[in-house]
Amino acid sequence: MIIAREDSRGASWIAELPTTVDELVRRWDLRVDGDALSGRVGLILPVRYRGTPAVLKVPFPENRERSEGWALRTLSDRACVRLFAEDTERHALLLERAGPAGPTATLTADEWIDVAASIASDLAIPAPADAPSLADTAGGWEQQLDQQVSNAHGLLSDGIVSRARETIRAVGRDDGTTLIHGDLHEGNVLAARRRPWLAIDPTAVRGPVAWDAFTVCLTRVSDLSAVPDPGEVLRTRLRRFCRLTASDPEYAIEVAHARAVSSLLHESAGGGAVFGRAFLERLVRTL
């Protein structure tokens, strides 16, 4: 996946990966404790660190304003995995081990939302002054929307596009004072020992807690796609999340609509199917 996405830069990074892992294992005195996992973002290796189950994460370098290590240090001892050590040059992290992935699938939709809301509430702390802001992303999001619409040849009505654009501009006006996970969904929540559930991969951005309602509540696409009015069911789920997190349900609904519009335009342009075009077309018209 990394070679396909990053071409020669990805191939070079992968060629150096065995040496990188060996050096980190020696430096942090780790004992390998299972088979490595690889995927879209890099390598995860189960290890033991001072007798404690841990994972060595070596991600492909990304251009993020603040590193994942910064996010985990800022959210230390809350409902996300702990950071034991970090190599900033290699972007490598030694993390508390949680998992396996997948147990949230045994929960009902409401039970999952309750778990996610509890995590979101625990992670919502006053944002440090140097935290990146969701508001700063709105300009790029609006430019992307305009480009997507110009290439979509009348896929969406002017009213749907205008509603999404106004929401994006509202995001840009709300600088916020709260630190949030930023990408909370079922793939980023694992069963754990220290707490029943822990979040992984926080982006840790400054913004409203209700921002994360979209990815939390749209995780169960198969459930939503099976009902006649997915918009109404999603609104009910968004309101549940916001009630439990004491956040703004109207903000969550409007942001969910705008993000669904962007997802539909992305998938319609051949950007890869995450939710499915047919489902998204129904959702943006009923939400």
Image (spheres, helix red, strand yellow):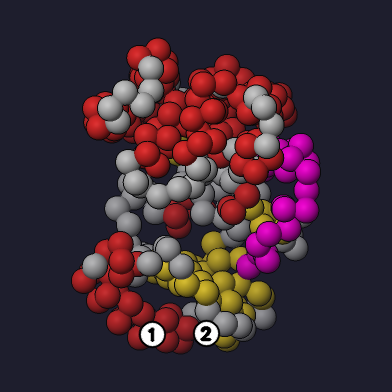
Q: Amino acid at mark 1?
A: Pro
- Which residue has dot 1 on it? 18
Magenta stretch holds residue 257: no
Q: Position of residue 185 (x, y in %)?
A: 59, 46
Point out the stretch of residues depicted in magenta: 97-119
Q: Indicate left or right for 267 with 107 as reference.
A: left
Viewer-nearest residue: 46 or 158: 158
Quarter containing the C terminus: top right
Magenta stretch holds residue 110: yes
Snapshot quadrant of residue 34: bottom right
Most distant residue in the top direction = 159
- Which residue has dot 2 on it? 29
Snapshot quadrant of residue 262: top left
Looking at the image, can residue 27 be seen?
Answer: no
The earlier-in-sequence mark between 1 and 2 is 1
Viewer-nearest residue: 22 or 155: 155
